[in-house]
Amino acid sequence: MNKDWILQKKETRRTYSKSTWVPLRASINDEKGKVSDTGYIEEYFGCGSVAFPPEHREIAENLSWGDIGLGCYIQPYAYEDGYYSTIEQYQRNDKEPIGIHLVFEHPQPVIGGNLWILNPDLVVALRLIKEGANWVRPEENFVVVAREVHDDEGKKHLIEIKREYLLDYLAARGLSLRLSYYRQRVENVVTLEASEYAGLGEHKEKRDGGRYELLMRSLNDVFGGSWAMLRAWRTDVDEEEDAPVMGPETNENTDSETTEGHRSGYNGVRISGEFWRDEWIEHSGTSKRIRGDEDTNLPKFIVETDGSWMASTELNNEDIGRWLWFRSSIVNELLGLRGFSLKWFTAETGGILSTSGYSIHFGINSSDLITVYAYDIARLPAWEQHVWATQNVVPDGKVSNELLASQGKFSQHLPMLLKNFFLKL
């Protein structure tokens, strides 16, 4: 390793408020060698998080690693007076919930281990399904929204979520997420002077919104030193009795012994760089997926033979009376996506069923272009609209005759046909 590695300057400059993925809970330890020997290298990252509403922001500002880090107790609790604290609630004081946990702990005392569970409210709100170690959103081409990472023994040591989807959820609930994380890097060297860390000295500093500390200690001070062991036992128990009974403990029926020693012989120096930081993940006030807020990043489509464009929001009207033209390759592109299917209605018209639940009625015109009623495209989720927009072309060859017949000519006569039908009844 080297000085840059132990000082962590690159890592401390990076914040999760600008990252694609945000850890909700993490405990990742990577080590090589024996901890008390020279040559040992360790890198650890731990992270805890709690979401807070605006009214508790001032209190949350003072919460750090010791409060919301990995030592934070995430369990339901039933008080004797009947008050019940759900596992979702973060309590600063008893019976005073001020925050929300997005990851739950589920101890397994019988079979061993400790499960981490992504908050079911988040899972259902974003309409996610679990596939292996990932939570995916089928409505958006099965994009991975959250994921968990396991160690070699199968234990979870990281749950993280894409910031885009986290912000949508936080906005819907009116919450801000506070992260508290800790990173440590350790290397045992023979001597400081002969190592890559020569010239460094112990120090503490505030850096990049957090605090960093560099420690240097001899391995003998860390692992060596005096030790003592105390053994105590009762002297009034008859092991030959079938049902022995012990009386109250006194000085006369107890005995003990003490053993002391000293351990040494650990040669080398332990170099440790530690960094702590608390960080807020703030939403932008928009929740397109959960609350259905207007999406301001929708594409434009060509609607005229001169190449004129119209915004998707302008086309999102059932009575818009316009069609769009697309390259025929759009069909294969969509069918290449998971969950899409095709069905034919006539020789020249069909429907493409998407994961969002919409069926796009299309027709093939005389120029072998795909024509679709504009409203059918404009009402699709944003990501699907962007796929269609890449294949949008200038109108050529008119609207498919069979499509126009079903959507235009037939619809014009439909009210009269229904009127005549009911008159006959």
Image (cartoon, grey):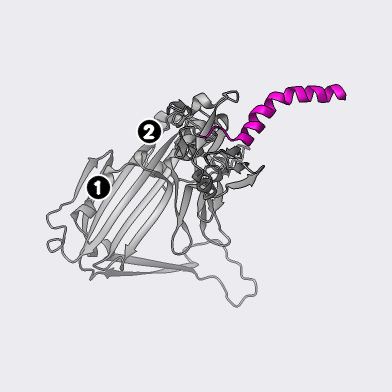
Q: CA distance from mark 2 to mark 1?
A: 25 Å
Residue span colored magenta: 397-425
Amino acid, disc 2: Glu
Determine if the magenta segment contains residue 25.
no
Q: Which residue is mark 1?
A: 10
357 vs 183, left or right, is right
Q: Circles 2 and 1: CB distance less than 8 Å?
A: no
Please state which of residues 220 and 180 is positioned toward the viewer in this rendering.
180
Question: SS class of the residue under badge 1?
Answer: helix
Pointer 2 or 1: first along the chain: 1
Residue 168 image offset from top left, x and y in percent: 48, 35
Residue 93 image offset from top left, x and y in percent: 48, 36
236 vs 30, left or right, is right
* Count of picture labels: 2
Q: Which residue is mark 2?
A: 61
Please state which of residues 390 and 4 is positioned toward the viewer in this rendering.
390
